[in-house]
Amino acid sequence: DESKSSSEKLSQSRSEARVERRRIRAAKSSKRMRKKLALQEEEAKRRSMVEAAKAEEQDIRRMCTLPEEELAKAVVDQLEERMTKIDALLEKMQDEEWAEDEGDDMTSANQKKQDGGLI
């Protein structure tokens, strides 16, 4: 009976030790998870503060912009758009001119071959 009781005690103490190790692991894991969540929350707060500061900056810039400045910016934007269109048109015209030059060169080369063959 004593051997049974000592083996039962040993088994019980092993079981208790296993339970204790699991409890400690769970506590450590929980602590890591809490730290991770806390860091994520802090980062989210920082991000929201930065976004709020940027929005406030934009509002202040809008309030400080004079109507003349807004008009000037609109004119500049319009002129830049026109310049882009002009650049595209000039590029197209240049491509067409090069294509014509290449066609003329080929035509004159063919003409020279034909003239050279007749002589």
Image (cartoon, rainbow, N blue to C red):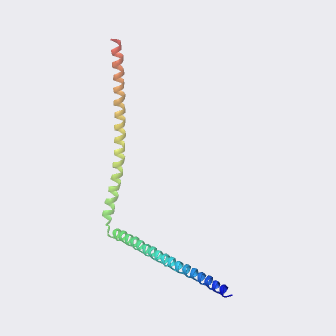
Residue drawn 34% across the image and 45% down it: 87
Q: Position of residue 53 (x, y in %)?
A: 37, 72
Residue drawn 54% across the image and 78% down it: 26
Residue drawn 35% across the image and 55% down it: 77
- Quadrant of the drawing holding the N terminus: bottom right
Residue drawn 61% across the image and 83% down it: 10
Q: Residue furthest right?
A: 1
The relative height of residue 13 versus residue 61 in the rendered view (above or below) is below
Q: Position of residue 9 (x, y in %)?
A: 62, 86
Considering depth in this image, is 78 or 105 the residue closer to the camera?
105
- Quadrant of the drawing holding the C terminus: top left
Q: Name which quarter of the figure residue 43 lies in.
A: bottom left
Q: Name which quarter of the figure residue 109 lies in.
A: top left
The relative height of residue 93 versus residue 72 in the rendered view (above or below) is above
Q: Is residue 109 left or right of residue 28?
A: left
Q: Is residue 66 left or right of residue 18?
A: left
Total count of labels: 0
The relative height of residue 69 versus residue 100 in the rendered view (above or below) is below
Considering depth in this image, is 92 or 21 the residue closer to the camera?
21
Q: Position of residue 20 (x, y in %)?
A: 55, 82
Considering depth in this image, is 54 or 74 the residue closer to the camera?
54
Q: Position of residue 66 (x, y in %)?
A: 31, 66
